[in-house]
Amino acid sequence: MAIRKYIVGSFDDEAALFPAVKKVRKSGYKIHDVYTPFPIHGLDTAMGLRDTSLHTAGFIYAITGTATALGFISWALAYDWPLNFGGKPYFSLPAWIPITFELTVLFSSVGMVLTFCYLCQLAPFVKKEHFNFRSTDDIFLMALACTDKTNEAETISFLQSLGAKDVKVDQREDRWWLGRYDKESEVFEKKPEGAVV
Amino acid sequence: MTIREHFEIPKRYNLWSFGLMAVGIISIILLYVTHGASNDEHERARFWSSLLQNSVFFLLVVNAAMFFISATILAWAGWTMSFRRVAEAIASAVPVIGVICGAILLAIVFGGDHAIYHWTDEKRLDEILEHKSPFLNKTFFTVWTILTITLWSLLGRKIRSLSLSTDKGKMSVEEGKQYQWTNTVWSALFLFVFALTVMSTVPWLWLMSIDAHWFSTMYSWYTFASTFVSGMALIALFVIYLKNKGYLEYTNEEHLHDLGKFMFAFSVFWCYLWFSQYMLIWYSNQPEETKYFEPRVEGPYRGIFFLNIIINFIAPLLLLMKRGAKRNYTTVTILAVMIIFGHWLDFFQMVQPANSGDHVPMMLYDIGVGLGFVGLILFIVGRTLAKHPVVPKNHPFFKESVIHHT
């Protein structure tokens, strides 16, 4: 878990953010991430993010649910403990379809929610450092990851020329921590000297 | 970008439409010679049930295009604008096929034969049919059929003429609002008529009354889902055809994606209704209800019955599930053809078993008649598209369709 350096530009308008994202990518900078108060349609394409695989995971959970339901019901009702319901055959598939459908939906929805939380590192009391809490309210942040070769002054002026209202060099720890934002400030205090908070 | 506004009908297109219509006419003549001219009532019913199945199916499919337009107008949807004229052109086949279908239906009711609609025989009415007779009688059937087809045609024509009125020139914002309001009112009227006809009474009268003693509350919804998904497939096919010919510049895979979603979603919806109808009857196991499924599940139609689920539900579900498949012109074309054929087959097994429950009649005749109707639809859609610009470029929502992405 290393402390990394980022150049963070804040925009006050999504109309300015879009062309800025395109130009930054065109100039060869690597965008670490963009933080916005609300989902912006088409931003993922502009940033060049690949399509999520969440739906593939969902499909796998769904067929697991189908197989579980059909497997269990047919084992229980046709093999382990056959019961006669209203003269129907032991293996009566139509009666099982509703349960199979429901288990399919249940497995895929619960599985996808958990997978989504895992991918986004979301769980109760799991906290990550923010560049700026205002990105959950009214400003749009673009963070560029710095390397040893990054010319900070040049990058800052480039972002400013693209319409960023405020650009600063920030340091951030990658790891998450357990606690609450209002009571725990452990991570914030560990910052090396010279870091801008 | 310049728009190629005027569709010129290619020679091959005309050749195909006339060729298919010729196939249809030859099939009808052959079917008439082999069955229709027979002395046996059930042999004659074979001829009429083929005409009934095909004309009702294709009438409801082309009418589904107008339902799609009205529903999207009512939702204030803009994404359809770049290809809406295609759906309108398909819906313009409603009056012609409606007249054909109405003539066939009335010929069956008043023709003197009772093999298809046995409730028309007043001498053989039993207690159940007596109870149904306030609804299921010749007068109501005639009045309602004529009224239905007339209202579909007139309201469809009105919505089409509203769309054509945008060709006069650009609208101001106020005019645009007024225009959208007029559209909303007329499409709401159409949907009201649609709900009273396709979604309830018309499938009862035209199709369910073939098995007059049997009933299912799911039947109309089931028929609607069947024809709507075929209608969406038909729109997708025409859009892809025009796109291949270099028209519809502003329609791209984003619009195809949404058409694909409709095909996918309504295939699932169709199966949901199909299963709801089947399972309750299977579960309660009442003889008067299971009688409908006897020739279909246990009898000679078993193969068609299960093939139906595979090509109308399982195949679209698995093959259209991926995002890439819905945006791919080839996959959508193949699946659209398959879906239309599958639902045609669905109508085949809805209509035929009542008359010939002991064997599956030779399907080639029915396919031939169906191809004739396809040729007729090709002919009418081609003419209508060629008459007016294929893109309503002055519509207030047009830009929304151009920048649409999913």
Image (cartoon, rainbow, N blue to C red):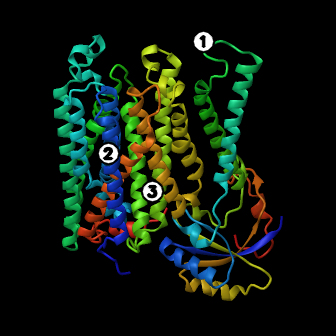
Q: CA distance from mark 3 to mark 1?
A: 45 Å
Q: What residue would you read off at disc 3?
A: B259
SS under mark 2: helix
Q: Horizontal and vertical percent for residue A58?
A: 65, 48
Q: CA distance from mark 2 to mark 3?
A: 34 Å
Q: Quadrant of residue A26?
A: bottom right
Density class for disc 2 (Cα within 10 Å; few <14, some 14-19, many ≥20) is many
Residue drawn at 78 percent across, 85 percent down: A149
Reading the image, the residue beneath label 1 is: A87
Q: Which is more toward the observer, A194 or B120?
A: B120
Chain of the residue that carries numbered disc 2 in the rendered image: B
Amino acid type assigned to the residue bearing label 3 in the image? Leu
**Tag 2 residue:** B28
Please report the residue visible at 46 percent of the width from the left and 28 percent of the height from the top.
Answer: B277
3 and 1 marks on the same chain: no
Q: Are marks 2 and 1 in contact (CB under 8 Å)?
A: no
Q: Nearer the viewer, residue B91 or A75?
A: B91
Would residue A149 appear left or right of B290 to someone viewing this image? right
Q: Residue at x 32, y 45 (%)?
A: B28
Work out whether residue B241 or residue A76 is closer to the camera in this orientation and state it. Answer: B241
Dot 3: element: helix
